[in-house]
């Protein structure tokens, strides 16, 4: 993510709060970069399971999202196609979300 590519976008009308600076890159690239930089960092925790907390590291999320992306392509889904997701708030959701975007 280049510093030159950072843009400032107002989140609210002028006078109602700060702007947010964010890189103008695809969302999937943010996961790739984060997984490269902090592979073992826990990105998501699912505390709702009876067997205890489950965790998903950034590198594992990227690996699983890439596998899901390949599965979607194998089904004939390509860039520009609409994909609907109906899912509970669970640890698999970020995998599906990023898999669709990769």
Image (cartoon, rainbow, N blue to C red):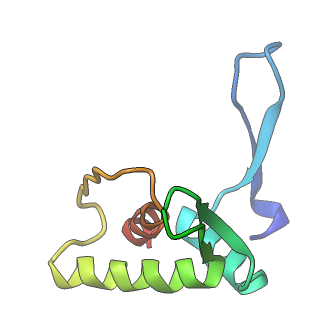
Q: As drawn, is 65 to the left or to the right of 41? A: left
Q: As drawn, is 29 to the left or to the right of 7? A: left
x, y percent for residue 35: 67, 81
Q: As drawn, is 87 to the left or to the right of 22? A: left
Residue drawn at 44 percent across, 73 percent down: 102
- Residue at the extreme front: 50
Query: Residue 2's quadrant in the figure?
Result: bottom right
Q: Using the image as rendered, state which of residue 34 and residue 21 is in the foreground.
A: 34
Query: Residue 5's quadrant in the figure?
Result: bottom right
Q: Using the image as rendered, state which of residue 49 and residue 8 is in the foreground.
A: 49
Q: Quadrant of the N terminus?
A: bottom right
x, y percent for residue 18: 84, 28
- 85 vs 35: above or below: above
Residue drawn at 57 percent across, 68 percent down: 52
Q: As drawn, is 22 to the left or to the right of 66? A: right
x, y percent for residue 31: 61, 72
- Residue at the extreme top: 15
x, y percent for residue 42: 70, 73
Figure disc tally: 0
- 101 vs 15: above or below: below
Q: Using the image as rendered, state which of residue 77 and residue 62 is in the foreground.
A: 62
């Amino acid at each position: 993510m280049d510093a030159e590519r950072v843009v400032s976008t107002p989140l609210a009308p002028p006078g109602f709060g700060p702007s947010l600076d964010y890189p103008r890159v695809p969302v999937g690239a943010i996961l790739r970069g984060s997984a490269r930089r902090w592979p073992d960092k826990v990105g998501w925790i699912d505390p709702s399971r009876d067997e205890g907390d489950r965790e998903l590291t950034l590198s594992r999320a990227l690996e699983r999202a890439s596998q899901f992306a390949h599965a979607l392509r194998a089904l004939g889904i390509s860039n520009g196609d609409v994909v609907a997701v109906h899912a509970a708030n669970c640890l698999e959701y970020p995998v599906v979300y990023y898999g669709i975007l990769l």
